[in-house]
Image: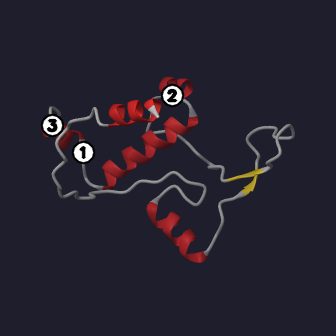
Amino acid sequence: MAVAMDMEKEAKVDNKPPTEQRRVVVTGMGVETSLGHDPDTFYENLLQGNSGISQIENFDCSAFPTRIAGEIKSFSTEGWVAPKLSKRMDKFMLYLLIAGKKALVDGGVTEEVMAEFDKAK
């Protein structure tokens, strides 16, 4: 009983005021998925019921019980990430970074616009 009460006290330590409801505007979209590398292709494949699931090709999976996955094929970092940085990063980080950069481009957020942002907020 004492342990349960201690855990309850720990859970209430956060005394932050509730966050205000703020409006969010989506200005651009970017995707890197097994169904496509741009929002239009991705959405079209979803509507058509296409599956991005296939036999794993990127590595030998014979030691594992699963032989299928939603691998991102024909993935390239060219033009998005410096080659040296690309070699040092894990694939999932590259997917995230490139999708984010594509979303910025799609939303028209250029280098000039980025320079004007108040990054302290």
- Read off the residue under disc 1: 110
From what the image shows, is residue 103 above or below residue 46?
above
Q: In which quadrant is the C terminus drawn? A: top left
Identity, as a three-letter code, of the amino acid under mark 2:
Pro
User: Furthest-bottom residue in view?
Assistant: 48
Residue 84 placement (x, y as % from top left): 50, 23
- Read off the residue under disc 3: 121
The residue depicted at 47 percent of the width and 54 percent of the height is: 31
From what the image shows, is residue 39 above or below residue 113?
below
Identity, as a three-letter code, of the amino acid under mark 1:
Thr
Residue 78 placement (x, y as % from top left): 50, 38
Identity, as a three-letter code, of the amino acid under mark 3:
Lys
C-alpha span from label 2 to label 1: 22 Å
- Read off the residue under disc 2: 83
Residue 120 placement (x, y as % from top left): 15, 32
Helix, strand or loop for disc 2: helix
The residue depicted at 55 percent of the width and 70 percent of the height is: 46
Label 1 Cα neighbours within 10 Å, binned few <14 / some 14-19 / many ≥20: few
C-alpha span from label 3 to label 2: 31 Å
Question: Quick one: label 2 or label 1, which is nearer the N terminus?
Answer: 2
